Structures are given as structure tokens and as C-alpha cells.
Amino acid sequence: MAFRHPHDSEILRLALPAFGALVAEPLFLLTDSAIVGRLGTVPLGALGVAGQILSTFVSVCVFLAYGTTASVARQIGAGNLREAIRQGVDGIWLAALIGAVVIAVGWPLAPAVVDAFGASAAVAPQAETYLHISLFGAPGMLIVLAGTGVLRGMQDTRTPLYVSVGMFTVNAALGAVFVLVLGWGIAGSAWATVLAQTGGAILYAGAVARGARRHGAPLRPDARGVRASASAGFNLMIRTLSLRVVLILGTAVAARMGDVEIAAHQIASNVWNLLAFALDAIAIAGQAITGRYLGASDAAGARAATRRMIQWGIAAGVLFALLVLAFRPWLPNLFTSDPFVRSQLLAALVVVALLEPIAGVVFVLDGVLIGAGDQGYLAMAGVIQTVAFLPAAWLVHAYGGGLVALWLAIGVWMAARLVTLGVRARDDAWLVMGAVRR
């Protein structure tokens, strides 16, 4: 694909830093795992349980970034810098409010949540310790999401990259000191993450406050704006929960097949998730670019940018498919020495590769519609997509299908996403012009 299209430079300018920031985020837990792993099996298991709970929470609350990106980008496109900052201020206030509620509600519920994940008697107390401390980082974590959305909406993905790298570095350094030098155990790892997240939140809040002063926007919360952010967030949360249901059910079906299958499925999912970061970077560019064009009432520009980003998504998907197939004979050896797991993984990776071009289009369209503020449709489409997956997953479980059959069921889900998002993109209903989507 020749890089001569007028939109290529802006796609690259937004997507490349976004990819770096996306890759930096999971390094938090990997770094914690490397440090806590030196304490033994039980603390590492506790981190695994608490980390899964926190990852689910972050996934559900990602609407703070996506919804803010869309609303701020529209105002930027319309030339309303003051109102764009105001939208960002409202998003950050909403994040702080949700964070406070999470602390109040999550503290007494932490033991029950850990127990629901099936933690053993040895692992549960340490998982609760990590979760209780991590709750104090919830406001910071959510403000980071909202602040990231503000800057992305303002067509800036470099600053979130720098902040993500800084947070990762601080987390790693403090974790090593608290756990390995001061001997605080798993609690030290949790405090390191809380401090890194809080530091990132201060940087984002400071950036938004400086923008507010520069453009004369008030820093106090606007009740109507916060309600509007919450309303858009609810629909995005439905969309995200629909995605999580599919992923969780897929893991549950694989677990019921046996230890070999769940091990191979976990590795295949990790490969899928790694490639998803690159595709999601294009989707994030899609959010910012689409919102800006629609805010400027430039439907033709939004259409042209969408077509080009779809081409980027297809090209990236085909490239990833070829890479997976090329490295497939050697990939299993990087993760396991079990010949049965390797055999299952080799077969599953073929389906993973074949799904990549579809994923390239789906991720882009998802980002475009988020950027357009089409949250209501995305929520409805998410439910439809999940409903399409359920019978396919049930058939795999009921008739003893193997791991390949499970990934084909995931393919049904991806096909449903392609159809529902593609039909919407071909229509004009999402092309709502103006600074505010009404």
C-alpha cells in the first residue's frame, strides 16, 4: 500500500504514538509479575487474581477515554477550543466521582470479589491486600483514562505515550524498592502502582487545567456536561461488557475442554491480543480524526478518512496474518515444551491468522463509530454480536468441539461485528454534523 494518500500522514501521526501507549499499559502488570514473582508462588497467584479483577474494571471504564475523545474531537473540529477543554474537564470530574464511588463500594466487597474468582485459602488474603491498596489508585487510574481521551480528542497522542512510559518507569522503580529493598511484600507492589497512577493523573489534570486557563474555560464541574458524559459512557460500557462476555465465555469453554486446551487457548489469546494493540492504534486514530471532521461538518472528509483507515486496517490484518503463519511453526516453542499443547496451538493459530484481516476492518469501524459518537448503535450492535456468538459457543461445548472449533466460533462473533459495523458505516445515520451530536 503506497503512502501517498492525503490522510496517511495524520493517521501515522496519531496511530504510532497511540500504539506505543497501548503497549506500555500491559507492562504495568508484567513488571509487577516479574517483581512479585521473586516472593514466591502464593504472592504471584494473588497478583494474578487481583490483576484480573483490576483489568476487568479498567476494561469496563475505558469509556472514559473513548467517550471523551469523541466529544472533544468534535469541538476541536468546530473550532471551539474553550468548549473542547470544558468537555475534558467534565470527563475528568466524572472519572474522579466514579473513582470515589469505587473506593467506597469496593473496599467492603473486595473479599467477596476475590472469593468469586476462586482464590485458594493461601492466595486470597494477599489478593485482598493488593486489591484493597489498589482501590486508592482507582481515581488516578480513571483520571488517566479521561485525560488520555482529552488529549487524543485534541489530536495529541504523543503526550499520552510520554505519560505512559513515565508511569511504567516509576512503577517499576518504586516496585523494586518497596518489594525487594524495603521488604513490603505484595503490598509494596500495590503501593508502587497506586503512586504511579496518581502521578499520571496529576500530569493529565495539570495539562487540562493549563488548557482551561489558556482558553478561559472554567474548572468547576458542569452538571449537564457530566450527565452527558455519563450517558455516552453507559452505552460504551454496554459495548465493552458485550466484548468481555465473549472473551470470558471463550475462556470458560476452553477450560472445560481440559488443561491442554485451556493452556493453548491462553497462548493463542495472548498472540491475538498483542496484534490487537496495533489494530487498536488505528482505531484510536479513527476516533480522533472522525470526531474532528464531523465537528467541522465535513462529511466528505470523514468518509474519505474512513475509507483510507479501512485500507490501513485490511493491510495491517493481512500483514499480521502472514506473520502468524510464517512464525507459526516456532511460536509454540516460545511458550511451552508440552507437545500436546503445542499441537493444539499450531492448529488454533491458523484460525487466528485467518481472522486478522477481518479484525483489521472491525477495529477501524469500531473506532470510527466511537469517534462519531454513535454510542447507542454500538451498544445495540454489541448485544447482537454477543447473541450471535452464544449458540456457536454452546455448540462447541455441547458437541465436544475442540480448540479450533472454539476459534471458529470466535470467528462467527467477528463476522457478526463486521456485518453490524459495516452496515452502519455504509449508511449515513452516523454522519451527524456539528460540535455536539444530537
Image: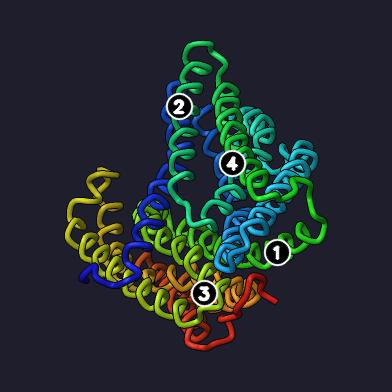
Circle 1: residue type? Phe
Q: Earlier in the sequence, mark 2 or mark 1?
A: 2
The residue at the point 65 percent across, 50 percent down is 215
Q: Position of residue 291 (x, y in %)?
A: 54, 68
Circle 2: residue type? Ala
Helix, strand or loop at label 1? It is helix
User: Which label number is shown at residue 234?
Assistant: 1
Q: Which residue is mark 4?
A: 207
Q: Earlier in the sequence, mark 2 or mark 3?
A: 2
User: Which label number is shown at residue 172?
Assistant: 2
Q: Earlier in the sequence, mark 2 or mark 4?
A: 2
Q: Earlier in the sequence, mark 1 or mark 4?
A: 4
Q: CA distance from mark 4 to mark 3?
A: 42 Å
Helix, strand or loop at label 4? It is helix
Q: Nearer the viewer, mark 2 or mark 4?
A: 4
Circle 3: residue type? Phe
